[in-house]
Amino acid sequence: MENPVAVDLVEFLNASPTAFHAVDEAKNRLKSAGYEQLSERDDWKLEAGKKYFFTRNHSTIVAFAIGKKYIAGNGIYIIGAHTDSPCVKLKPVSKVSKGGYLEVGVQPYGGGLWHTWFDRDLAIAGRVIVREKKDGSESYSHRLIRIEEPIMRIPTLAIHLDRDVNEGFKVNKQTHLAPVLATSVKAELNKTAAGNGSVDEKTNTNQKHHPLLLQLIAAQIGCEPADICDFELQACDTQKSVIGGALKEFIFSGRLDNLCMSFCSLKALMDSTSSEESLKEESGVRMVALFDHEEVGSDSAQGAGSPVTLDALSRITYSFSSDTKMLPIAIQRSYLVSADMAHALHPNYMDKHEENHQPKMHGGLVIKHNANQRYATNAVTSFLFREIAAKHNLPVQDFVVRSDMLCGSTIGPIMASGVGIRTVDVGAPQLSMHSIREMCAVDDVKHSYEHFKAFFQEFSNLDAKLTVDI
């Protein structure tokens, strides 16, 4: 029997080709779970025992549930993850014509395994700003778009024309990654058949992009091509996320890094606050923060390096007290789980892992350590997270990168240093990280969800038993 949490994750993944769609899916789920949407542009009137969320740029979302016993200065217990994944994004001027082909100009986002994007059936998704006219007035709307049909491809060069390719294929991200949209001949015939007037090529947007591409986008949205003012679009793999393996023990999907952790934390928050009784004895605030732009350093208005977390903590605290001394007290009582996928031991590259730190599939969440603070974990924060696992008989693993290799990083150190919050870095083990198709274990999805749910339900009581800075 398939695990229902893993099945739900697959549905979440298939609904979330971009960060914008992931936030939209999270937003819909939160509303269904009784969470009230707030706007950062408005004053907040918060109440103990209530559940809220807000979005920023529609690519970052923060949800929180306030305990019935919460008072200003109490801790806020956060699981932070990210909504973005490496991909190829359309350039501001994407119109490229070469050798009788219409190509789409793209730029790489993040540190992807770019060779995995070749010879894949690609679609397009993202957001579009649309001009709308009604009753003589003009306004603009923000629309999500997803063309699910395979409309593009990045073809490899035949081995007959590159005999040494198997000795090492090096991708030139400027010249090799442009997807083919159509041939020029067919595009011209299509333009003629459409009456040659369906796209106003005098508009600025339509000079930047192929009319054929704009027609496809407009048809999907239900507007005229001339009404497309701007967009943020990316290429997406058309292959669906699935549960696979001979024993149905794996999830094969794109964007597991980091939508897997985003989903598990979100579901844990919703399920830990699903009944009226669930917040009755809670003295803190349970929060999930899913950020954009982690893959490129988090330095944006909606990244983990922005004030978004501190803004949320401030507004929650000051909704219950105007005393400015309460916020720094609340921060010192708070705790962050930085949840980002981890590197499972690869059977074909076992020498890439340190001998005593080899996370395995089905082995539970991985606690990440780095003496040079590439991860924010320390003895106190790892103990607290590990203790929750021990109480629920949940497996947990440790990871340290080899001392002769560079270590990656997460939002953990960014938020620990920027906010001053105690932090532990964790993640579910996976293979093929940053490939267009990744894989993780079904069991680890279940372990992650259960660990995060227990964290929300029990951290207040556990933290009260630990004394450090006294």
Image (cartoon, helix red, strand yellow):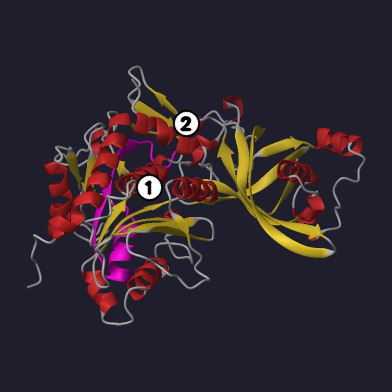
Residue at position x 80%, y 59% from top? 133
x and y percentages locating residue 53 in the rendered image: 44, 58
> Disc 1 marks which residue?
266
Please name the amino acid that badge 1 sits on: Leu
Question: Looking at the image, which is closer to me, 18 or 21?
Answer: 21
Q: Quadrant of residue 205?
A: bottom right
How packed mark 2 is, by other alpha carbons closer than 10 Å (few <14, some 14-19, many 20 or more), is many
Could you say which quadrant of the image residue 381 lies in?
bottom left
Residue 175 visible somewhere in the drawing: no
> In what quadrant of the picture does the N terminus appear?
top left
Q: Is residue 162 left or right of residue 284?
A: right
Return the residue nearer the eye: 123 or 29: 29
| Residue under numbered circle 2 | 241
Q: Earlier in the sequence, mark 2 or mark 1?
A: 2
Q: With respect to residue 174, does 349 lie above or below?
A: above
Q: Does the segment drawn in magenta span residue 208?
A: no
Residue 443: image x %, image y %? Answer: 28, 31
Magenta stretch containing residue 410, yes or no?
A: yes
15 versus 225 height, above or below? above
Which residue is more in the foreground, 291 or 332? 332
Badge 2 element: loop
Q: Which residue reaches farthest top?
A: 246
Point out the stretch of residues depicted in magenta: 406-435
Q: Of the numbered discs in the image, which one, if any, rests on residue 206?
A: none
User: Could you say where residue 336 lies in the image, as x and y percent from the top left?
Assistant: 27, 59
Cα distance in 3D space between marks 2 and 1: 19 Å
Q: Is residue 292 shown left or right of residue 150?
A: left
